[in-house]
Amino acid sequence: MTEVLVDGHASDRIPVDDRGFLYGDGLFETIAFVGERAPLWARHMARLACDARRLMMPPPDIETLAGECWSLAAGHDRCVIRISLTRGSGGRAYTPPERPATRRILARRPWPIDLDRQRRDGIELHTSPVRLAVGGELAGIKHGNRLEQVLAAEHARRAGVDEALLFDVEGNLVESVSANLIFRLDGALATPPLDRSGVSGVGLAWLRESARETIATRRIGTAELERIEGLMVINSVAGIRPARRLDGHILAIDPACRGWQRQWDRLFQCAD
Amino acid sequence: MTEVLVDGHASDRIPVDDRGFLYGDGLFETIAFVGERAPLWARHMARLACDARRLMMPPPDIETLAGECWSLAAGHDRCVIRISLTRGSGGRAYTPPERPATRRILARRPWPIDLDRQRRDGIELHTSPVRLAVGGELAGIKHGNRLEQVLAAEHARRAGVDEALLFDVEGNLVESVSANLIFRLDGALATPPLDRSGVSGVGLAWLRESARETIATRRIGTAELERIEGLMVINSVAGIRPARRLDGHILAIDPACRGWQRQWDRLFQCAD
């Protein structure tokens, strides 16, 4: 069964001169399909189009992507499809060609193991030794330059924890390796700003629009981390997972968590 | 004639699950071969080994790389070989496999056109609208996350200039898109620090050790840029090129430039 489509053709290889490979010159979306439905599809596509504009790439062909995604998802109860959109081949070293022909690589992946358990029982995190660089140019974009996340994930693996909190070099909390964060501090729910680093997640965007509770944007540093009363991570595939242990300390499951999880489940069961 | 070797085999494709493609999870070196000699080889390999350590990747197999590079360079007067060393396939999303098997991709490219002319007549630069992120984690490393350089190169292409000066988000000069910088200010030669962003170039390292003149490390901002008396860019393929025009203003060729260029030429003609 076809697992990967490269520009619409079944293939498991890409050209060595693809700029995504050479420079990380591209974008990606990781999309949850449940019962062949992708309830966050429109948000993923809106982000992809917005990020392509920011990277001065041609806009994605959403119709073609949809056709190919659904053909890959067909017959699967649950799966994840990664869409990679690169600036294609050509150009002269870093300089892109004048009229880049983007390349799309769609790969179906099995549903991650452990997610159901993690959503129920929560996850363990540590504070990553990796500090994110600060700079507005790429902030918020889901681009192919993910070495900071790879390094943080490797540290987390070696430390035996599920996830890691990432601070930037100035000591501000940003995100976890593969999710956005929601914390409770002084009784109020908030999420860190993503204007200088991090990925602007579609799962978080959905939640902020859908939740009854207000989720503010609040900058916090390492000192305030000790005072947080609850912590959740959210991404578009795993949904909402509570943090149960942070740097060895037990955290209670936030009062908002279970309700949001039910809301998430309804989204994936009932959306078109 | 073979142009690309993937793990030693002639091929022009890599697997779609290569982590270099998925996350920019890898390193590269771009090496000048002249008369089948690569005078900066040892420096390239030392940097590759050092950077692999910093990225927590297995060390490169230098002997194998040498054998493959020289087989690709054989019969060519001048060529450039790009070595890409990725963390291979596998792992779980950002998390690398416990024992990654790196993948090496060696590609021979023709000698860049225009270099001889640019070394003689100089290049035109502008100040890039792209500001580099600031963060020590990846600073100095020649890694596969080069979107900032791609964006800066695209702006330079649209502006019709050869190269671009890159400042970081805090307003400090760092490098050009594909080279390190040497400037003269208050009569003294200096190069910007690379401890928070930028690539630590092997061409620059060679020059600082080989030149009679002292090249200091000096942090300068946009305001001081207007006062510089001379500017050169240096990388391991193009050697030393004088800046003749910066943001529309004419710059004189620095007194050190021609002597350094002759020294560079001797290196490439005489080294083993």
Image (tube, coloured by chain):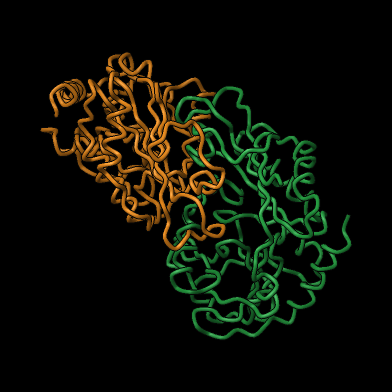
Chain colours: A orange, B green
Camera-side residue of B264 and B132: B264
In the rendering, at what x and y percent does residue A119 appear?
Answer: 29, 19
In the rendering, at what x and y percent does residue B223 appear?
Answer: 49, 76
Locate the C terminus of chain A by quadrant.
Answer: top left
State left or right for residue A87 relative to residue B191. left
Camera-side residue of A2 and B93: A2
What is the count of numbered marks?
0
Q: Is residue A171 visible?
A: no
Instruction: Kindly give the residue lying farthest to the left in the view shown.
Output: A212
Query: Up-down: is B235 above or below A68?
Result: below
State left or right for residue B268 relative to residue A43. right
In the rendering, at what x and y percent does residue A29 appear?
Answer: 34, 38
Query: Up-down: is B69 above or below B245?
Result: above
In the rendering, at what x and y percent does residue A85 appear?
Answer: 39, 44
Residue drawn at the location 57% of the way across and 56% of the way down: B198
Locate the N terminus of chain A by quadrant.
Answer: top left
Residue drawn at the location 16% of the way across and 26% of the way down: A267
Residue drawn at the location 29% of the way across and 41% of the way down: A64
Camera-side residue of A241 and A22: A22
Q: Is residue B128 visible?
A: yes
Location of residue A54 by image quarter: bottom left
Query: Up-down: is B230 above or below B148?
Result: below
State left or right for residue B47 relative to residue A237. right
